[in-house]
Amino acid sequence: MGNWRIFGETIAPGEKRQTVLRVPVGGLANAGEVSPGGRRGDGYEMPVILINGARPGRTLLVTAGMHAGEFNGTPAAIRVARALEPSEMSGRAIFMPCVNTSGFWTMHPRMLPEDGYNLNAGYPGRPDGTVGERVADFFVREILPQADFILDLHGGSRGERMTPLAFFPTNPGAREASLKAAKALNLGCLVESQATKGQYSYAASALGIPGLLVERGEGYICDAELVEANRRDILLLLAHLGIIPETPGLRDEALKRRVFKEAVYVDSEWDGLWYPAVGKDQPIQKGQLLGTLQDLYGDSIGEVRARCDGHVLYVYTGLAAPRGEFLIAYGVADSEEK
Ligand SMILES: [Zn+2]
């Protein structure tokens, strides 16, 4: 495999390099930094580890921390990137263990604090836009075209209890390869997604690059077991793509996988206190009570019932639910597959 020219660097075959990506943001204040107070130049900073295998093969992009408070992907990406031996690899890997560095260091749970931008909903961005729009645009122009497959690691937002799952894209050009890869991982819930504005979903819908968004975690907590599960899934995916040899014993052969045709998302229609009546990872039936909303005196404001049979994917368990706040998501029309 030849030299790899990427982000202004030249990486020789068999070489691993860690560096800092700087997205030009035109001097906009408070943009991200790899270390707080450690800015070395203009631009929104993101850490990246580039690994050029000794032999040719495919390129995997692993991103974590798009939503800054979804932590479990970050240590997993760091550990795998450090452990990989480029001399044993056929292909390349780009690890971005913390994309939303400004949100990370300011302890923002989700969006870019500079502009409230959602990196999982705002693609393709704009080169002359806000900080978030420029970060998205940088991904579209500089990063995504390098990848043959994208793994974007999320971890349940603040107040969310989350069934570990993978979203895979619905568009025909990327669906099959994405679903096949999802089945190589240790995730029991695989959900077809209609989204097209997130990082991996834009890559799939606009560029035809297969990929997965994996959710493991909940509620602004870093969980060692879930970090380890992510670490194993990154290794399983690298092996599935032929970039590293298979590691015996990593895959849970007994795991039953459910594939859902779509997910139903319910947002609050009222300002209320949300009391969920069901938990994550449980089957539900059409008409079943999913939760109630009450006012601050305990009077009922409304209730949420299942529109159809399904399976609870994640539940908001924060109490405050102003109008428009996410309450619950459930997968529907599942089939059981090995
Ligand atoms: Zn997320």
Image: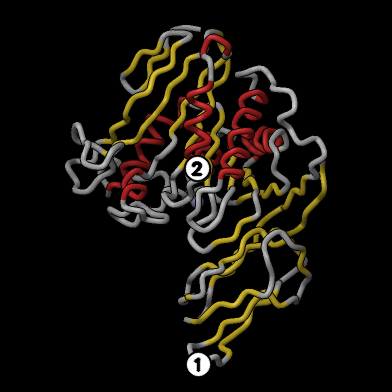
Report crowding for label 1: few under 14, some 14 to 19, many 20 or more residues within 10 A (C-alpha): few
What element does badge 2 sit on? Answer: helix
Residue tagged 2: 202
Amino acid marked by disc 2: Tyr
Rendered location of residue 323, percent (x, y): 47, 76
> Is residue 232 placed above or below 287 in the rendered structure?
above
Horizontal and vertical percent position of residue 292: 61, 81
Cβ of mark 1 under 8 A from ligand 1 = no
Which residue is depicted at the point 56% across and 68% down?
A: 317
Q: Between residues 58 and 36, which one lies in front from this camera angle?
A: 36
Quote the CA–CA distance across marks 2 and 1.
44 Å
Inspect the image, locate mark 1, and give the three-letter code of the amino acid beneath it.
Answer: Tyr
Nearer the N terminus, badge 2 or badge 1?
2
- Vertical position of residue 18 compared to residue 256: above or below: above
In the image, 181 versus 294, the foreground residue is 294
Residue occupied by mark 1: 297
Q: Residue at x 74, y 23 (%)?
A: 248
Which of the two discs, 2 and 1, sits closer to the camera? 1
Above or below, comparing residue 218 to residue 123 in the picture: below
Few, some or many residues within 10 Å of mark 2 (<14, 14–19, 20+): many
Relative placement, left or right, of 25 versus 323 is left
- On the rendered structure, is 290 left or right of 19? right
Q: Nearer the viewer, residue 336 or 247?
A: 247
Label disc, if present, on residue 163 of the rendered structure: none
Is the CB of mark 2 within 8 Å of ligand 1?
Answer: no
**Residue 102: % across, % down:** 31, 47
Residue 153 at what x, y percent from top left? 53, 42
